[in-house]
Amino acid sequence: MRFEQSKVIKKPAVPVTVHLVNGEVLKGFVFVQREGRVLDAIENREYFPLRMLEGVSLIRSNNVIRLEILTYEEFLAEEHAFPGADHEYLRSQKW
């Protein structure tokens, strides 16, 4: 499926660490609405997209036992795990 560039809505991406019920730990970006919160992006949804190094995966919300939002400093320490980050948005820490 191809999307026309005009129909793609760019959303800010917040770096997170996701802990799943099976013990797996994932690092990636959760997409939020501009001026939105991470909780708004995942609550009341069966699945949410998580962009990782390997690509985008859909994560089942009820399999998440803990979700940590990284500070900008924590993000910088592990920047290799978060390609394509918008540093200006992350420095603002408006999420």
Image (cartoon, rainbow, N blue to C red):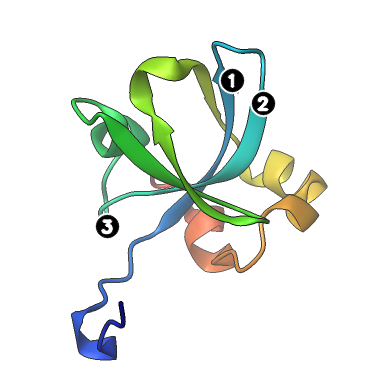
Crowding around mark 1 (Cα neighbors within 10 Å: few <14, some 14 to 19, many 20+) is some
Where residue 21 sits, quadrant-wise, is top right
Does 8 sit above or below residue 37?
below
Question: Disc 1 vs disc 2: Cβ atoms closer than 8 Å?
Answer: yes
Helix, strand or loop at label 3? It is: loop
Residue 94 location, x and y as percent? 39, 47
Residue 57 location, x and y as percent? 49, 47
Three-letter amino acid code at the position of disc 1: His
Report which residue position mark 3 lands on.
Answer: 34
Q: CA distance from mark 1 to mark 2?
A: 5 Å
Q: Is residue 66 left or right of residue 73?
A: left
Quick one: 17 or 24, which is closer to the camera?
Answer: 24
Does 92 sit above or below residue 43?
below
Q: Residue at x 27, y 82 (%)?
A: 3
- The earlier-in-sequence mark between 1 and 3 is 1
Q: CA distance from mark 2 to mark 3?
A: 26 Å
Q: Quadrant of the N terminus?
A: bottom left
Marking on residue 19: 1
Q: CA distance from mark 1 to mark 3?
A: 25 Å
Marking on residue 36: none
Residue 2 location, x and y as percent? 31, 83
Helix, strand or loop at label 2? It is: strand
Report which residue position mark 2 lands on.
Answer: 25
Q: Residue at x 28, y 39 (%)?
A: 41
- The earlier-in-sequence mark between 1 and 2 is 1
Three-letter amino acid code at the position of disc 3: Arg
Q: Quadrant of the C terminus?
A: top left
- The earlier-in-sequence mark between 2 and 3 is 2
Q: Residue at x 48, y 54 (%)?
A: 92
Q: Residue at x 18, y 25 (%)?
A: 44
Quick one: 84 or 53, which is closer to the camera?
Answer: 53
Crowding around mark 3 (Cα neighbors within 10 Å: few <14, some 14 to 19, many 20+) is few
